[in-house]
Image (spheres, rainbow, N blue to C red):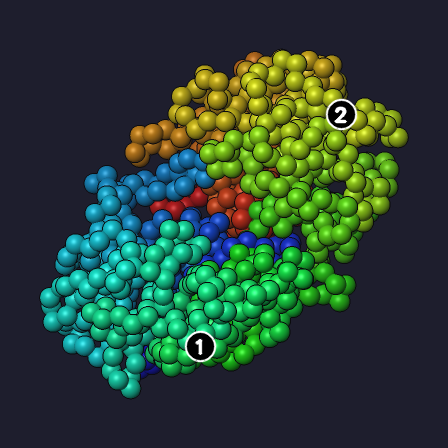
Amino acid sequence: MACSRDKHTVEVKNDTTTNPNGRNDAWGFAGYGGGGAMFYPAVSPFNPNQALVACDMTGSFITLNGGKTWRMFNLRGPVHYFVYDPLDSNTMYANSIGLFKSSDGGTTWSLLYPNPAAVTALISKGDHASEELVTNDSTQRHVPAFAVDPEDSKKLYAAISIDKAIGFYASRDGGLQWTKETDLPIDVKNIYVVPGTPRNSRTIYVATSQSVVVRQNGHWKTNPSPQGVHGLTTFSGGFDKATEKFVLYAIAGKSYFDAEGTGSGIFYTDDGGATWQNRESGLLKYQVSAAPLPEYRTVATSAAHPETVYISYNSLKVHADTTCIGVARSDDFGKTWTLAWKDKLTKGGNIVSANFEEEWINKRFGPTWGENPFSIGVSPADPSVCYATDFGRTVRTTDKGRTWQQVYTNEQPSGGWTSRGLEVTTGYAVVFDPLDMRHAFIANTDVGLMESGDGGASWQSATQNNGVPKRWANSTYWLAFDPEVKGRAWSVMSSTHDLPRPKMWRRNGVTGYEGGVLVTDDAGKTWQPVSHDIGEAAMTHVLIDPSTPKDSRTLYACAFGKGVYKSKDGGKHWEQKNDGIEGKEPFAWRITRRDSDGVLFLVVCRRGESETVGGELDGALYRSDDGAEHWKRVSMPEGTNGPMSLTTVAGQPHRLLLSAWGRNLKARFAGDEGGGIFRSDDDGQHWTAVLPRDQHIHDITFDARTNIHYACGFNGSAYRSGDEGATWTRIKGYNFKWGKRVDPDPADTSRIYIVTFGGGVWHGPARGDTDAVEDITTPLFGRH
């Protein structure tokens, strides 16, 4: 698309938010920023300080100030691309479960395609509660590529998939009506509109993995990919005013996105793919002779300045002892290259690029954690400015890569870090030290345990050089402080992340899982593994029996795939306690204790994804009346096989609250069943569904100070109940798609933390924000 300014251009609206976190409501966040993969940065053609970034965990983000702060919004699924209107600075598009449009600078969004009038339902299905639009003709519709005409915002171009049949469509009325022009190959990547061509018969380039499909003078033809190349992974393009040619770049070869890639190269064409030139030679001059070809992870250019092009590279062997990763830049259409970001990986240690600003991920893990960028977005107006995203960071350059600034976190005088709003981590709990309320931990996946010494104002890693085995540091599933002994706590860690999601064991099972139980007596300054009797396992929970002597606590631990273990001496020794638990590899997940009588309840996660109930792959509930020596099964609600958490109710000796994941019904447009929240008044003999409208509830928690129960799950909602779980009210303003747990703020009964699967930790009003505006304003998407 062209990015010219003309009389249609309007100014970017001022940010009217008053929340210091940059949001449009009363919600904020508690964290350090980054720590999860981000993708698809797009820079406004009007203002290089405005950019959009997506995370594959459903969050999307916008900055209006060059990355000093970011505001999260959620479009019900991961966004796969953003497109700015080249004529109206307040209009932008994002493709998620549908094609969305914002006309107010990204503050709110509405569904553009499919037409909302044709959508009859919105369902969520499967383990990730993936949302799907149901149309009145029962077709599945998606928009894999999209573009706006450079001179007419009403003219839109899209590759539209209808039941996997893809065609090129055009609209002349802003997307209200679409006309199909031709069929397209399956793997469409991008659509490019060539400026300067006739307005009523634009030249169009449709980039696919194996070709460029060209519309010229009203006729369509297909130009194949470069000779010997069987898959182009990424394209980028721009219009060169000097030659009046549209330049396309494409990359190929083995890479993170194409493990079987052939025909490596950085390819250039200025004739729509009729001819190609491989322009990697200027980059390969940096590598030693006979070295394997490097990986090209992404390519990006400026829409109005294609002479400047950036490449994300990996495995560039520049010396017998040194391999480099980073970003290369060319200012002459790829003929020559400069290594603008050059992390050095050597046998003696890894060295961060000298022009790269310090940030917590490099400081904690080094350059091999974030790696080189997945995606790069270059300013259409100024090729000096680009944003890049990788496994854990968003970074920015304003001088063509001569220097790089991280834009996801702020270092504090204490040495800790505070998020700028790019919240992309997965957590399991926020835990405060009951004997030092300024001291807190977040139990995370991938970045491991994080720690705050200032009440949550800043954070730093809590697993570095302090006794935590490196192989366990990836994920902390739980941490429990001793309520009486200052500084003593137990944690459970594992090298395996994201449990109990089936993607983690679906292919390879659980026998190779590593992890264990650790203890600290100095509030986390040092940790000691104490689970030698258990052996390696993905430990997911640890429970303290507070009624036992404080110098020899009884502990219970869950090992995912091994079952339940018990220690009677504070963790020094452990015994397996699986008597009565069915199955060879019980997916022991959570264990809870009823204070009134000491009865234990155990949640065993299901190990299958069948729509049926009653098989050996079902999850299960158990109870023990003798300290885990024997277990007996507790019935579950009819039609339920995916228990997630169980909570007892204080003062009600037989009342239980159960959260569950729905069963994935295989019918094409059937929502899941058997999930939600259930209540029993007879220790699980009978159950009543009390929140059936939300089929994917993760944890139920309780604030004893206010007698309020909380719950959240994977359907963009958190809930509260003031009547012991009989009824539930949505907490307004919180809308991250994948929620996991609500932890009450111990310093303020009016506030809560919401721990998410990929959206960090939210912090906000326990009753919600009644004035909060939802990110999606289309009525179909309303939450209740």
Q: Which residue is mark 1?
A: 337
Q: Three-letter amino acid code at disc 2?
A: Trp
Residue 251 against residue 765 in the figure, above or below:
below
Q: Which residue is mark 2?
A: 574
Depth order, front residue of 335/379? 335
Label 2 SS: loop
Q: Which residue is drawn at the image coordinates 46% and 79% (left, top)?
A: 384
Is residue 421 in sight in this rendering?
no
Residue type indicated by callout 1: Trp
Ranked by sequence position, the earlier of labels 2 and 1 is 1
Instruction: Name the residue at 11% across, 66% down.
Output: 219
Name the outermost residue toward the front: 290
The local crowd at label 2, few if under 14, some if 14 to 19, many if 20 or more residues have their Cα within 10 Å, is many
Looking at the image, residue 224 sits to the left or right of residue 423; the answer is: left
Nearer the observer, 292 or 64: 292
Answer few, some or many: residues within 10 Å of disc 1's Cα (few below 14, many 20 plus, some between 14 and 19): many
Give residue 285's position: percent from left, percent from top. 45, 74
Determine which quarter of the picture holds residue 671. top left
Residue at the far bottom: name it.
242
Mark 1, secondary structure of its residue: loop
Q: Is residue 737 visible?
A: yes
Please give the name of the residue rendered at 54% of the width and 60% of the height, measured from the top-left corner.
371
Callouts 2 and 1 close, C-beta under 8 Å = no
Task: Give how far across and how far down residue 350 sits, in percent.
Answer: 64, 63
